[in-house]
Image (cartoon, coloured by chain):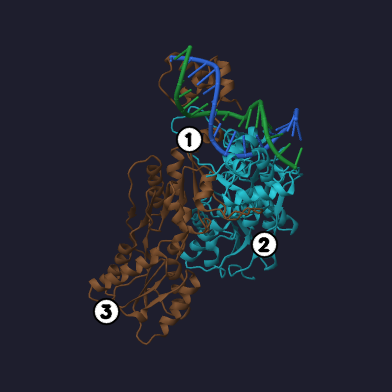
Chain colours: A cyan, B brown, C green, D blue
Amino acid sequence: MATINDIAEIAKVSKATVSKVLNNYPGVKEETKEHVLKVMKENNYWPNSIARSLSTSRSYTIGIFDPERLNNFFFRDVFEGVENVFGIKGYDILYFTNKQWEDTWVNFSYTEKSKNRSVDGVMMMGFGAVETSQFDELLESDMPSVFIDINLVGKNTTYVSSDNVEGARKAIKYLYQLGHQKVAMIKGPVGFKPASDRFIGYQKTLNELGIEYNPDWVFSSPYSTEAGYEVMQEIIKLEERPTAIFAEDIFAIGVIQAIRDKGLSVPGDFSVIGFDNIELSEHYELTTISQNRVGLGEAAAKLLLKIIDHQSFSPVILPTELVIRKSCLRI
Amino acid sequence: MATINDIAEIAKVSKATVSKVLNNYPGVKEETKEHVLKVMKENNYWPNSIARSLSTSRSYTIGIFDPERLNNFFFRDVFEGVENVFGIKGYDILYFTNKQWEDTWVNFSYTEKSKNRSVDGVMMMGFGAVETSQFDELLESDMPSVFIDINLVGKNTTYVSSDNVEGARKAIKYLYQLGHQKVAMIKGPVGFKPASDRFIGYQKTLNELGIEYNPDWVFSSPYSTEAGYEVMQEIIKLEERPTAIFAEDIFAIGVIQAIRDKGLSVPGDFSVIGFDNIELSEHYELTTISQNRVGLGEAAAKLLLKIIDHQSFSPVILPTELVIRKSCLRI
DNA sequence: CTGTTAGCGCGTTCAA
DNA sequence: TTGAACGCGCTAACAG
């Protein structure tokens, strides 16, 4: 591969000049500029990004920390959005692996890992319910960072998330319009912001609608289809049963299975409304609240770009959408 | 962040010495070595990987080219496998974005992109049915590379894939054992190696079993559930119908839907056997051939590591597994 | 407008 | 066993 020195030599100019045309700096005669460009093209020259990073401490690379490791449908789509916008801008994406170095004695922090690789910014996603103090160092550093679904802000940090409160409200209102006033909820794990926001939306909306909140109809669990299945078995045993269940899709699938296994039907015996619009929900004809996952990724990436470019920025909250399928019935 | 100079200064040695202990080189007194290590620890020092890359042209980073962009269930799992092994070895993963640089005049080749970022090797996946001449330059270069599902080899190149021929054989044999001798196949797009291998397995096995091959029962299409649905509608119209359908899961789901929509049943009227074991297949109770996707990623990563370390290597073909659910019936 | 020079942080001879 | 000095490829003052 040709280096800047080769080009300088061939073009009979100094490498400083080559560097200037490379970066489109002013103060280069149009004529020499064209000549240099021609030589570059002829030699298929492209600047070595490593060397460039070393001297500018900019790498055109953004880092991603993602403990969920793309196993989660949600973050795969977010990742797509992130890639969409960074790709256009010429960035590549460095995916930080989770494992520790085999023979290391240092416990690398997010900040250190990022600075070590000279990434221009980091995307923080897939942390779930987690102690946020682990991010203190990052927040105080000058490393640009954007969190997904964790509302942390700092001088170089912000976040994006869906409007989960409003999303839950949409679900409950829709149920209400169909005549449902007895609606149970399965909420996600404590400490996971989106889960608690959805619960808040549930409570607030019941209140607005003048419906009494019944704590017996609220369940909480880590996410799994099995959990949804089990909770629904409990609900069926209840003396006073709800007529509808509001639960994130992963739960809702289990809820539907449990209902069917009891010889009952959705939406005949219970209406079920989900949250997330996962791929499976379509196959279960589950009415649900959809998040704009790719949009979240794109919004996050744009925010990160703003921070990197020292523009002003503030958190982005994206609206959700009601996707009506066949799991809710008017009563 | 402390640099090697800081450490040298604090430890009152030269940076050459620091570098030597850093790389565990011989020729440094145990005493000084320990002293330097201590200073490193105290200052939480870690070498800057960019600078290191520049001087060694090794980056402890591997690149991934993936036009499918993780949208494909298959490659997400492969990616997980890749990450598993590289994480342990202290590598991070650079995900090359697809887009071109906004203001570039050079059409970057895989080799150039890789060299430009100084990655130690590249993983090539998600290319589908594609003109392999585009990889010629990479094959001839000294950049270590491993392909997934494209059988390319070179002095620094090899590949991994599942044993698709044998996988198809397992499917057809299973069907045969259940009494099926009339089995249709929907095959994937022409030029996609795994698809054609599965077709070869289908034909060979029919032949071995002494069953006549009926071209009217073979369909070909790009992958989609809709295509499976449509093909099955055709099959149902056939004068002489097969009793079983062999099709990749994504097709098979559509096949099942079409059968059900006609008021027929699986496996009552048709047996269906898939290939891939996608997440949905479980929900359709589809009997299928499962690939070890994570294993493919791990195998690929290990191969790449071998090439990087100049060890000998050769392609890896992984076995498949029959996953019996409820979509096939004895007749 | 162009070129000289000094870094960026590290690895690596080669002397001492 | 240690260290001075140079190079990796590029950017960024500063002179000319």
Residue A52, position in %: x, y? Answer: 61, 39
Locate residue B18 relative to residue A150 in the image: left or right: left
Who is closer to the viewer here, A97 or B15? B15
Mark 1 to mark 3: distance in Å? 56 Å
In the picture of the structure, the residue carrying the numbered disc 2 is A321
In the picture of the structure, the residue carrying the numbered disc 3 is B212
Badge nearest the viewer, 1 or 2 = 1
In the picture of the structure, the residue carrying the numbered disc 1 is A100
Q: Secondary structure at mark 1?
A: loop
Where is residue B27, by image quadrant?
A: top left
Asked whether the viewer can see residue A244, the reply is: yes
The quarter of the picture where the N terminus of chain B appears is top right
Residue B184, position in %: x, y? Answer: 36, 76
Mark 2 and mark 1 in contact (Cβ < 8 Å)? Answer: no
Query: Given the image, on which type of amino acid does mark 2 rest?
Result: Glu
Badge nearest the viewer, 2 or 3 = 3
Chain containing mark 3:
B
Residue in the image at 47% along x and 70% along y: B222
Who is closer to the viewer here, B49 or D13? D13
Residue A8, position in %: x, y? Answer: 62, 41
Chain containing mark 1:
A
Query: Given the image, on which type of amino acid does mark 1 rest?
Result: Gln
Q: Secondary structure at mark 2?
A: strand
Locate residue C9 relative to residue A197 in the image: left or right: left
